Amino acid sequence: MKYIIFISSIFISFNVLANSKEKSEFYNCSLIVGDFLWMSKTEVSNAQYRKFTEENLHDFTVLPDSSLWKKKVGFSESYEKYYFRHPAYNDYPVVCISKENVIKFCSWLTKQINAKLSNNNESLVKEIIVRLPTEIEWKNAAKGGLSKYNILPWNGNSLRLTEGKNQGNFRLNFKRGNGDYMGVAGSLNDNADVTAPVKSYWPNNFGLYNMCGNVSEMILDSDYSFGGNWSSNGYDVTINSKISTQASCSIGFRYVIEVVKWREIKSKSKIKINKQFFARNFISVNDSFKIMNMEVSNELYNIFLNETKYSRPDSTLWNKKFYYSNQYLIKYHWYPDYFNHPVVNISKEDVYAFASWLANLYNRTHYNKVIFKLPNEKQWELAARGKENILMYYPWGGSYIRNAKGEYLCNFKPIPEIYAREDKFNNIYYDLSKENDFMLGADLDGSLVTSKVNSYFMNNIGIYNMSGNVAEMIDGIGFTKGGSWNSDMLKVQINNRETDCSPCAEVGFRLVMINK
């Protein structure tokens, strides 16, 4: 009965996600990345795993090997006989199982949830997968949004609560010394001889229990299990503590649920392309041309697609750019949250088709006839500088990239200052030799990839994102201007260029309007 509630509550929460902007929790799960990756709040319990075995009675190999208790515990007969089957241990973590059987469990749970989702057209979520977390996912979730250098799921290095009414109590289940699985009697006791119930102690900032201690947890992309366990000493129950993954009474697991397909929403555009649209969205730079005050958005480009049946942007170009880029592949061009983001993954040929379509709409309603085209480099730089005709680094003037509050002034790829070094000539450089994270620091400016086309700060004539967000195509030349969400701070300067990689996820466009 409890397990049926577990499955149903996951399904209900997908309905909540479909009908609310709130980041609601699944039963027994918390969001750990965006709106698409959830992690089990607890380790998988005996009761949950037992339901899986009951539906796979033909496969005796999925049962825990309870004889493994002998290797860890003296007088193990009671654990061998009762730990997995007896109701008293329902809420304790399942152990003594192989990684192969954990993968089978995840596959089974995937089918259970997707079967319910297939009958629910109200949910935006169409399909999910249940799997083990990767090492990076597990460690980031364990830190719960705290510093990347944290070694425990809470701040500080103490294994006890350091304040409040429970001050002095242990925060996790571990072994204090050889032969001592019970701790010290009384309030200092860790309350467990071997494992503790999966919802023991205090959760971290993501609402996840026992990310350190209790049982070491398997991960997807490694043959190690992390976090330490009930038989680990205090120095070995950190986030980085690891042991070889093999069936054992000290190793369990928790899963993540990743959304892999979303239902497409037929949402009516709020943009009306009329005289007011052109007056509102094109800024006069000088007597010879006007320029769009924002990059062309998905919403505007989708109007063009719907009216002309032109081919859609190549969303596969998001694939494998960084962790979770598949979410942009399946959502970016149509999902309402991205309507006001710049269109990407298009070619110059696509831009010319869009410009011709827009000119036809304009020329139907205006006496003066115009053409729309990509700006040349001189036009783009004039628009970026606005009223200023002097040489300057950025559209806001000056050589700085933060305002007085320390906020970044555009969307680019900052490198965390902790990596800054100084050479013998006092020049600053960044040492990333120990890092291989493609997206390192990418979200320090508030955006992981693109941001809304009217984000950050306008220049002095009311134009957004002339630096950063997406690199912008230039007419007839093989480079872009302005830099993108994936550019360093030098490439987002007005005078600099980048090679035009379009169609790609880093390049978009805006148009200029010129009288015929």
Image (cartoon, grey):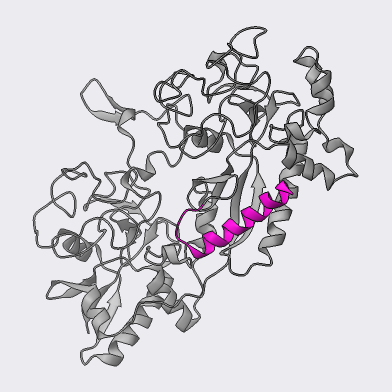
**Along the line of sight, the residue nearer the viewer: 426 or 199:** 199
Residue 435 in which image quadrant? top left
- Position of residue 438 relative to residue 419, above or below, is below
Q: In the image, residue 438 lies at what x, y percent?
A: 45, 40
- Position of residue 376 relative to residue 145, above or below, is below
**Along the line of sight, the residue nearer the viewer: 185 or 130:** 185
Outermost residue, right direction?
58
**Along the line of sight, the residue nearer the viewer: 229 or 384:** 229
Outermost residue, top direction?
178
- Residue at the location (47% across, 80% down)? 306
- Quadrant in which the C terminus appears: bottom left
Is there any visible trace of residue 103 in the rendered image?
A: no
Residue 342 in which image quadrant? bottom left
Looking at the image, how many numbered discs can be counted on the residues? 0
Q: In the image, residue 470 lies at what x, y percent?
A: 35, 57
| Left or right of residue 52, residue 497 in this image | left
Q: In the image, residue 278 lies at what x, y percent?
A: 25, 80
Q: Main secondary structure of the magenta part?
A: helix
- Position of residue 425 relative to residue 378, above or below, is above
Q: Is residue 17 magenta?
A: yes
Residue 155 in which image quadrant? top left
Q: Is residue 363 magenta?
A: no
Is there any visible trace of residue 329 in the rendered image?
A: yes
| Left or right of residue 208, residue 231 in this image | right
- Residue at the location (14% across, 62% down)? 386
Q: In the image, residue 89 lies at what x, y percent?
A: 73, 31
| Left or right of residue 508, residue 278 in this image | left
Magenta highlight range = 1-24
**Along the line of sight, the residue nearer the viewer: 177 or 140:** 177
- Position of residue 331 relative to residue 216, above or below, is below
